[in-house]
Image (spheres, rainbow, N blue to C red):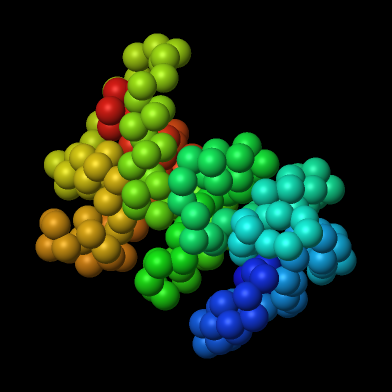
Amino acid sequence: MIRVLLVDDQHLIRAGLRMLCDAQPDLEVVGEADNGRDAVSLAERLTPDLTVMDLRMPGLDGITATGRILAARPAARVLVLTTFGDDDHLYPALNAGACGFLLKDASPEDLLDGIRRAAAGDSPFSQDVLRRLVRRAIQAPTEGPRTAVALTARERDVLALVAEGLGNTEIGERLHIGVTTVKTHVTSLMTKTGSPNRVRLALYAHGA
């Protein structure tokens, strides 16, 4: 069971997220907060597996709250869910320690997948956010050449599409395979390349 703390200043958003999570057999909403200060307090008291964090809230904002939660409990996981995907929100959130960054226009399926992946230690990103992260990282200096690993033909196909910033559903549609199969290939690619998340995997594909 994944224990989730929901943080958003809009009651309607929290209610929708709770309904979505409560319908899943492996998710349990253990608390809700409508501001960053209460989020920090509840995260300390409830020790959820994952905090789903909005960014713009009255009083203490989500970026500051994320930093305080992780300062108190470094092993905590905070997944940003926001309307604002610009760099002014993205990079401060990641610098504060957020493990992923999803936009509120995500489909219910992508949101649930992101929650599960974040709780499991992965770093989920909305596709346009992932593309921007990859573009920026490619432009940065690299430490040296990547280590070559043996990949199957299908793994190379999947890797190329991950490098484009495509999500699992899009990759499955492009290659005419199921989403579960895509996830299996992505997991195998991460293991073989030593990539902790899709951003690093995309960078590997670009030779960074």
Identify the residue at image location x=67%, y=49%: 63
**Relative to 189, 115 lies left or right:** right
Question: In this picture, is 126 found above or below 24?
Answer: above
Identify the residue at image location x=41%, y=16%: 142
In this rendered view, identify the residue nearer to me: 156 or 19: 19
Residue located farthest toward the top when viewing the structure as drawn: 144
- Percent x, y for residue 17? 56, 78
Question: In this picture, is 136 found above or below 75?
Answer: above
- Percent x, y for residue 71? 80, 43
Tell me the quarter of the image containing the C terminus: top left
Question: In this picture, is 201 found above or below 168?
Answer: above
Q: Can residue 97 be seen in this view?
A: yes
Q: Can residue 76 be seen in this view?
A: no
**Relative to 201, 111 lies left or right:** right
Identify the residue at image location x=74%, y=48%: 64
In this rendered view, identify the residue nearer to me: 97 or 178: 97
Residue located farthest toward the front when viewing the structure as drawn: 58
- Percent x, y for residue 12? 58, 82
Identify the residue at image location x=40%, y=54%: 126
Tell me the quarter of the image containing the N terminus: bottom right
In this rendered view, identify the residue nearer to me: 14 or 158: 14
Question: In this picture, is 125 found above or below 17?
Answer: above
- Number of numbered discs on residues: 0
- Percent x, y for residue 95? 63, 37
**Image-quadrant location for residue 51:** bottom right
